[in-house]
Amino acid sequence: MARTFAFFGPYITGPEAQSLRARIRSAHLARLKPLHEQGVITNGGPFYNDDGAGEGAPDRPFGGSFFIMEAETRAEALKVLQEDVYYKEGLWDIPQIRLIEYVAPK
């Protein structure tokens, strides 16, 4: 039976973060599409890093990724993340990643 996990992956900080994201984003999205279609990733996307301070600004910088995932084990969910280009290329701040199991409402 699949378990539900919340993933929070902040990006590295510094001027290189946004350029790295721009360079590898298409590969990241291409990999996520089938995972979403298979029901592995059920929801998610990028989040802003400014806590709403720049709300409404067209150029608000993204600060990381957030997903809701379904997997049989935490190790399986972590493997999905480790195979992502954002993980492999170091866009996600690896020590700050959180992968937490939770009980989803029915």
Image (cartoon, rainbow, N blue to C red):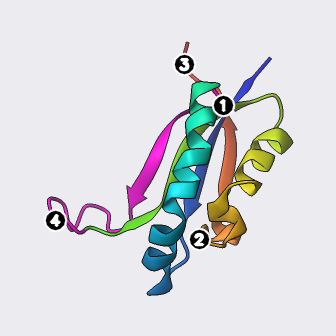
In-image side of 66 versus 80 (left or right): left
Boundaries of the magenta span: 39-59
Can residue 14 be seen here? The reply is no
Name the residue nearer the viewer: 86 or 24.
24
Label 3, residues with CA under 10 Å away: few <14, some 14-19, many ≥20 = few
Picture residue at 81% right of the left edge, 28% below the top? 72
Assign a secondary structure to mark 3.
loop
Which label sits in the foreground, 4 or 3?
4
Quadrant where the C terminus sits is top right
Label 1, residues with CA under 10 Å away: few <14, some 14-19, many ≥20 = some
Q: Amino acid at mark 3?
A: Pro
- Please provide percent x and percent y for residue 81: 71, 51
Lower sequence index among marks 1 and 2:
1
Q: Which residue is tagged 4?
A: 57
Circle 1/circle 2 CB separation < 8 Å: no
Residue 39 lies in what quarter of the image? top right
Q: Which residue is tagged 2?
A: 91
Q: Amino acid at mark 2?
A: Leu
Lower sequence index among marks 1 and 3:
1
